[in-house]
Amino acid sequence: MSEKRMRKNPKILVVEDFPSDQKMIAMALERESYDVITAMDGKEGVEKARKEKPDVIIMDVMMPEEDGLDACKELKSDPDCSHIPIIIHTSIQDSPVVLREKQKTTGSPYADAYIDKPCDPNVLLEVVKRFIHLSEFMKQAMNHERSHKD
């Protein structure tokens, strides 16, 4: 069997505390054959990211337990998770931290992309697809690097 046929559907972690938003995002992703994992806050999101190693994470900002920016920073500082693309999906466009981070193009301690709420699910899907390709490339590069260390 070819590698392509054996490959699983990309796994997306959706970290969102509003059940209706979480459901809308999950349904849009599942229609595109993504495997979806959900978490209700940043703390649970970090735990699931470490356990499940998703291909992409979609993260809200304002959540109980641990907010999305702290969760992103924690994941980006973890060598086992730092390669996972994180998309911030937030309605707090005027937050100084979010505005400052949106202006950065690389090296953000928080996220790789920002999408304002509400957004067209098709826009979100396009961004996810871009990061799926990036995630696959990063995994291949990491595997290549590991194989040359031995």
Image (cartoon, rainbow, N blue to C red):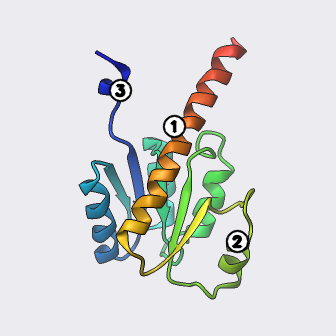
The disc, 2 or 1, on the residue closer to the chain's N-terminal end is: 2
- C-beta proximity under 8 Å, tags 3 and 2: no
Q: Position of residue 120 (x, y in %)?
A: 38, 74
- Amino acid type, residue under disc 3 in the picture: Lys
**Residue in the image at 47% along x and 46% along y:** 132
Q: Single out the mark in the foreground, 3 or 2.
A: 3
Within 10 Å of disc 1 (Cα), the crowding (few <14, some 14-19, many 20+) is some
The disc, 3 or 2, on the residue closer to the chain's N-terminal end is: 3
Please name whichever residue, 2 or 94, is drawn nearer the observer in this view of the structure.
2
Residue 100 vs 5, above or below: the answer is: below
- Amino acid type, residue under disc 2 in the picture: Glu
Residue that badge 1 annotates: 136
Q: Quadrant of residue 14?
A: bottom left
As drawn, the label of residue 101 is 2
Q: Position of residue 22 (x, y in %)?
A: 33, 69
Residue 47 vs 116, above or below: the answer is: above
CA distance for labels 3 and 2: 36 Å
As drawn, the label of residue 4 is 3
Please state if 141 lies on the left or on the right of 44 as rendered.
Answer: right
- C-beta proximity under 8 Å, tags 2 and 1: no
Q: Quadrant of residue 86?
A: bottom right
**Residue in the image at 57% along x and 29% along y:** 140
Q: Single out the mark in the foreground, 2 or 1.
A: 1
Q: Quadrant of the N terminus?
A: top left
Secondary structure beneath label 1: helix
Please name whichever residue, 134 or 81, is drawn nearer the observer in this view of the structure.
134
